[in-house]
Image: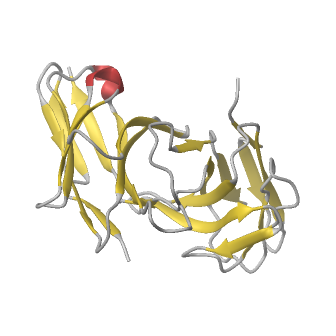
Amino acid sequence: DGGITQSPKYLFRKEGQNVTLSCEQNLNHDAMYWYRQDPGQGLRLIYYSQIVNDFQKGDIAEGYSVSREKKESFPLTVTSAQKNPTAFYLCASSTPALGRSGTDYGYTFGSGTRLTVV
Amino acid sequence: AQSVTQLDSQVPVFEEAPVELRCNYSSSVSVYLFWYVQYPNQGLQLLLKYLSGSTLVKGINGFEAEFNKSQTSFHLRKPSVHISDTAEYFCAVSVPSGNTGKLIFGQGTTLQVKP
């Protein structure tokens, strides 16, 4: 079955350490997204990519970096510059919104990675 | 720019009672509308979506929502809830005419179903 796989499910980071969260999809979706979830704040967009080798900053990109070398993969690196990284991170994918009006249009989410600073 | 407001952070309700989770959005252009459910430590599962056509949308698990363009609302309803409906619910919008495709979320509503 097609879907999005996020790994690991739980991740612990030491102060000053960079960590990378994995996101892989086999849905042949063009666009991929990273969201951060904190209690009471909903989901906030970190980075998104509409095509391979191209990505844009979202609303809270500071302290994060991404790459999109393959259509299937969109890893997120949480750098030491991110001062409050403890959160639940969700990856999603979709076909681009432009020109789409069919009933199949939508977004698929991974099961998330919970990152904790220790 | 678009924004989404979920009017209730928590909604307590007794089992088998009806429930409505409220969602209002702001946008100067047409939007697509979504409701997602999230169980603890899991990803988001799509309940239903409005893209076009009938303003009453039926989704999974007995949920439905009505798109009201004049009131810019997309409230989620269920006539009789179960304990298993206890979860976090998110309303979201995206812009079909834009070229980013990103989803903009509300803050979420926690539905607490009591026996």
Q: In the image, residue A20 lies at what x, y percent?
A: 82, 59
- In-image side of B106 versus B40 (left or right): left
The answer to which of A33 and B70 lies nearer the viewer is B70
Q: Residue at x 71, y 44 (%)?
A: A10
Q: In the image, residue B50 lies at what x, y percent?
A: 32, 44
Q: Residue at x 24, y 29 (%)?
A: B113
- In-image side of A56 versus B115 (left or right): right
The answer to which of A66 and A78 lies nearer the viewer is A66
Vertical order, B2 against A38 (above or below):
below
Classify residue B62 by image quadrant.
top left
Classify residue B92 by image quadrant.
bottom left
Q: In the image, residue A109 lies at what x, y percent?
A: 59, 43
Q: Residue at x 23, y 32 (%)?
A: B64
Vertical order, B95 against B44 (above or below):
below
Q: In the image, residue A111 lies at what x, y percent?
A: 62, 39
Q: Residue at x 12, y 28 (%)?
A: B18
- In-image side of B50 versus A108 (left or right): left
